[in-house]
Amino acid sequence: MIIGNVVGNVWATRKNDSLTGLKLMIVQRLDVCSNETKESFVAADLVGAGIGERVLVATGSAARQSAEMQNTLVDATIIGIIDEVDVPDES
């Protein structure tokens, strides 16, 4: 799973039928240990995340494990909105 920040939306009027009704969001991957941002990618949103929220993303075949995502052409799905991340200081 990946932790990331939602930074935008994607609209596509022409798309595969399996994507109809899905909310597509742009997520920027976050390294929570160094607080560095990494690459951005598109993820289907199942939990109603909004821009600026920190989210948990499932990728690969795990992104299609819920009932509403089977037979859908996605490789990243937002599965949670994160309230808090606790990374103990290593010093």
Image (cartoon, rainbow, N blue to C red):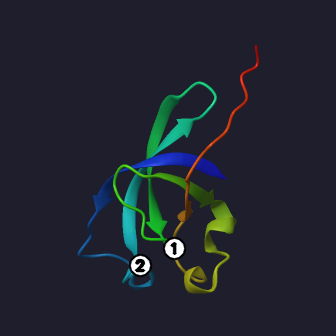
Instruction: Give, as a three-letter code, the residue at label 2.
Output: Leu
Most distant residue in the right direction: 90
Q: Quadrant of the C terminus?
A: top right
- Total tally of numbered discs in the picture: 2
In the rendered image, residue 89, in percent from the top left (x then y), is placed at 71, 22
Q: Earlier in the sequence, mark 2 or mark 1?
A: 2
Instruction: Give, as a three-letter code, the residue at label 1.
Output: Leu
Q: Residues within 10 Å of mark 1 (few under 14, many from 20)?
A: some
In the rendered image, residue 44, in percent from the top left (x then y), is placed at 46, 67
Give me the residue at 62% from left, 59% from top. 59
In this picture, residue 8 sits left or right of residue 90: left
Give me the residue at 40% from left, 77% from top. 22
In the rendered image, residue 73, in percent from the top left (x then y), is placed at 51, 73
Most distant residue in the top direction: 91
Badge 1 marks a residue whose secondary structure is loop
Residue bearing the label numbered 1: 73
Residue 6's place in the image compared with 35, above or below, is below
Residue bearing the label numbered 2: 19
Give me the residue at 50% from left, 73% from top. 46
Instruction: Evaluate if marks 2 and 1 touch, with contact meaning CB atoms under 8 Å apart.
Output: yes
Q: Residues within 10 Å of mark 2 (few under 14, many from 20)?
A: some
In the rendered image, residue 27, in percent from the top left (x then y), is placed at 43, 50
